[in-house]
Image (cartoon, rainbow, N blue to C red):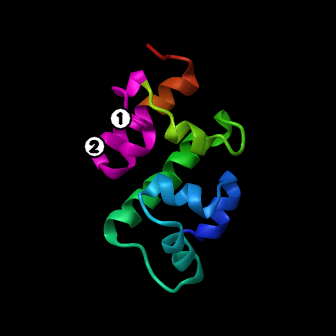
Amino acid sequence: MDNIKRLRAKHDISQEELARLLGASWPTISRWERGVAQPAADAENRLRRFVELGQRVGDALPKGELCRFLLTPSPLLRGYEPRDLLGSAYAFEDLLDFVEAAKSGDMV
């Protein structure tokens, strides 16, 4: 698993913001960063999907905007917040398709 502190710095997000995105608490994020605890399987999957999403988004969003994007409901995602789609492999594929369509300017 990527270094979580480095990941947060890359996306300019706080422990609290990452916790909100992953459905965890900020003390849990702190414990992961310090190596005191490891993410449970579900949290690790969400974290891996967050990393992949960040790579896919790349420079399409200004630094610090990924968190806002993930917390904003979208009618193109059936009203879901994109972060809600990090919890399911199937739904995550929809999110990746959405991101790729947005990057190519092919939003319908």
Quadrant hosting residue 46 = bottom left
Q: Nearer the viewer, residue 56 or 16?
A: 16
Identify the residue at the far bottom of this view.
36
Seen at 52% across and 76% down, the residue is 32
Query: What residue type is disc 2 on?
Result: Tyr
Q: Out of 59 and 44, give the one closest to the viewer.
A: 44
Residue 90's disc is 2
Query: Is the C terminus in the top left, top right, bottom left or bottom right quadrant?
Result: top left
Residue 19 percent across, percent down from the top left? 50, 60
| Residue named by callout 1 | 94
| Left or right relative to 71: residue 90 | left
Q: Position of residue 96 (x, y in %)?
A: 43, 37
- Image-quadrant location for residue 62: top right
How many neighbours does mark 1 have within 10 angstroms: few (below 14), some (14-19), or many (20 or more)?
A: some
Q: Which mark is residue 67?
A: none
- The amino acid sitting under disc 1 is Asp
> Residue 87 in magenta?
yes
Part of the protein shown in magenta: 75-97
Q: Are marks 2 and 1 in contact (CB under 8 Å)?
A: yes
- Mark 1 secondary-structure assignment: helix
Q: Residue furthest top?
A: 108
Q: Position of residue 26 (x, y in %)?
A: 53, 67
The answer to whether 79 appears left or right of 72 in the picture is left
Q: Nearer the viewer, residue 25 or 39?
A: 25
